[in-house]
Image (tube, rainbow, N blue to C red):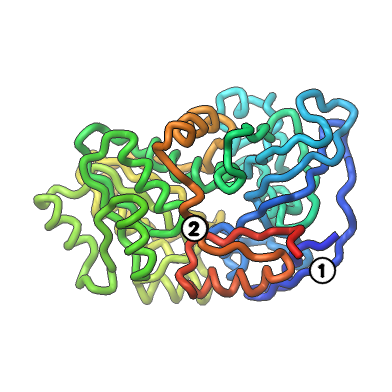
């Protein structure tokens, strides 16, 4: 089969790789029909995530047709069209039983932190992902969801990560009616977080980024105020002034370790990799939120230390909430939102690219060319 093959930072190609096999009676094999490139895939692509090994296939956002199932799979059969959450979760462990499917204790040998994730380095279990023609799906009775007949597959594939991650970012913010919410990052997750903030009752939503076409997209898609931090002397001062000197009620970090905007953080976190990525967006979130406010973090950072102003967190009485999205827990309500027309995820998709052109798609997405917001790979496209 054809599959994306990681060859080192900024180097990917499409190669022939062996077909996946049923390795456990709870496995399924899925023929991929759509697979996205996620903003967090760019952290891998840029060499920001430890233990990302040459030869790995990325891709934690995909949907497809069930080709084969293991002997103990009961809920799926060959021919079912399913979306597959990015979390690999057993459904039975202590954390899955609490709905923390992103923290499954059985799917990842590094389970003191994150659970298993498709195509996301050996720190997340070392599983190959869905930027391929076929993929092995463990715990097939737990994660995959049948795509309703009425649902557009373009919406379905975005339910595997982007929509639930953005929604959970807003949920973790504890947004109350009338709140002012600031979202750092106008990538797909940040855009969905901004869109979701309205669903929780926000009265004002502000998006901060540095790329003009993404800011314009935020105004149109999320009906948010959108500002370029490159045009500010200090984003924190700007946000304090626009919130009557109090600060925002909720700040959401939807950027993570690939942030820009501070030379020292870029040097230590991005260039020298002496910390787990550039944490400037988290700095701004902590310093821009009001006293007693909430900072919600869904941006990806590595597992080592960061330069974070923890003293400001303590002295301001800030609550910090962060996690990988528990997709399975959120799917029922998100399906309802889509069916009711409250969110339309497929609007985020700007590029549809054959899998064979994945290297070009990564470059376009990474370099923010051609107005790219969200690229989708088509593994079986001619």
Secondary structure at badge 1 equals strand
Residue occupying image coordinates x 80% and y 45%: 136
Return the residue at label 1: 15
The location of residue 307, given as percent across then percent down, is 40, 61
The location of residue 308, given as percent across then percent down, is 37, 57
* Quarter of image, res 92: top right
Which one is nearer the viewer's eye here, 56 or 108?
56
Which one is nearer the viewer's eye here, 111 or 334?
334
Q: From where the camera sits, is residue 312 visible?
A: no
Q: Residues within 10 Å of mark 2 (few under 14, many from 20)?
A: few
Residue occupying image coordinates x 34% and y 36%: 199
The location of residue 344, given as percent across then percent down, is 45, 44
- The answer to whether residue 377 is above or below residue 295 is below
The location of residue 71, given as percent across then percent down, is 90, 28
**Is 55 positioned to the left or the right of 367 in the image?**
right
Residue occupying image coordinates x 51% and y 75%: 367
Count of numbered marks: 2
Residue contact at pointers 1 and 2, CB within 8 angstroms = no
Of marks 1 and 2, the one in the foreground:
1
* Quarter of image, res 363: bottom right
The label shown at residue 305 is 2
Spatial CA distance of label 1 from label 2 is 35 Å
- The answer to whether residue 1 is above or below residue 321 is below
Q: Earlier in the sequence, mark 1 or mark 2?
A: 1
**Is 130 positioned to the left or the right of 364 in the image?**
right
Q: Looking at the figure, which quarter contains the N terminus?
A: bottom right
């Amino acid at each position: 089969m054809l599959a994306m093959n990681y060859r080192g930072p900024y180097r990917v190609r499409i190669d022939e790789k062996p077909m996946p096999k049923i390795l456990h009676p709870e496995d399924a094999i899925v023929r991929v029909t759509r697979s996205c490139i996620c903003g967090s895939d760019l952290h891998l692509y840029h060499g920001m995530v430890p233990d990302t090994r040459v030869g790995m296939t990325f891709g934690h956002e995909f949907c497809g047709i069930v080709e084969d199932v293991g002997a103990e799979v009961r809920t799926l059969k060959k021919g079912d069209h399913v979306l597959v959450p990015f979390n690999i979760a057993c459904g039975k462990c202590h954390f899955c039983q609490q709905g923390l499917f992103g923290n499954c204790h059985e799917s990842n040998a590094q389970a003191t932190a994150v659970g298993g994730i498709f195509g996301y380095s050996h720190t997340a279990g070392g599983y190959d992902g869905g930027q391929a023609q076929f993929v092995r799906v463990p715990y097939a009775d737990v994660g995959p969801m049948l795509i309703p007949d009425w649902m557009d597959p373009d919406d379905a594939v975005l339910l595997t990560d982007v929509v639930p991650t953005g929604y959970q970012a807003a949920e973790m913010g504890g947004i109350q009616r009338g709140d002012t919410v600031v979202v750092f990052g106008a990538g797909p997750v940040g855009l969905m977080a901004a869109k979701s903030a309205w669903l929780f009752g926000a009265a004002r939503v502000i998006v901060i980024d540095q790329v003009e076409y993404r800011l314009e997209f935020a105004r149109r898609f999320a009906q948010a105020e959108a500002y370029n931090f490159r045009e500010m002397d200090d984003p924190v001062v700007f946000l304090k002034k626009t919130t009557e000197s109090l600060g925002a009620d909720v700040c959401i970090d939807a950027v993570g370790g690939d942030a820009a905007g501070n030379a020292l953080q870029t040097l230590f976190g991005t260039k020298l990799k002496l910390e787990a990525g550039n944490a400037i967006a988290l700095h701004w979130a902590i310093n821009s939120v009001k006293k007693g406010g909430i900072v919600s973090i869904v941006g990806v950072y590595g597992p080592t230390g960061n330069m974070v102003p923890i003293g400001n967190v303590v002295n301001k009485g800030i609550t910090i909430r962060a996690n990988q999205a528990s997709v399975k827990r959120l799917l029922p309500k998100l399906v309802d939102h889509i069916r009711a027309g409250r969110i339309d995820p497929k609007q985020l998709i700007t590029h549809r690219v054959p899998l064979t052109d994945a290297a070009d798609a990564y470059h376009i997405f990474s370099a923010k060319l051609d107005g790219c917001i969200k690229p989708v790979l088509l593994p079986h496209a001619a």
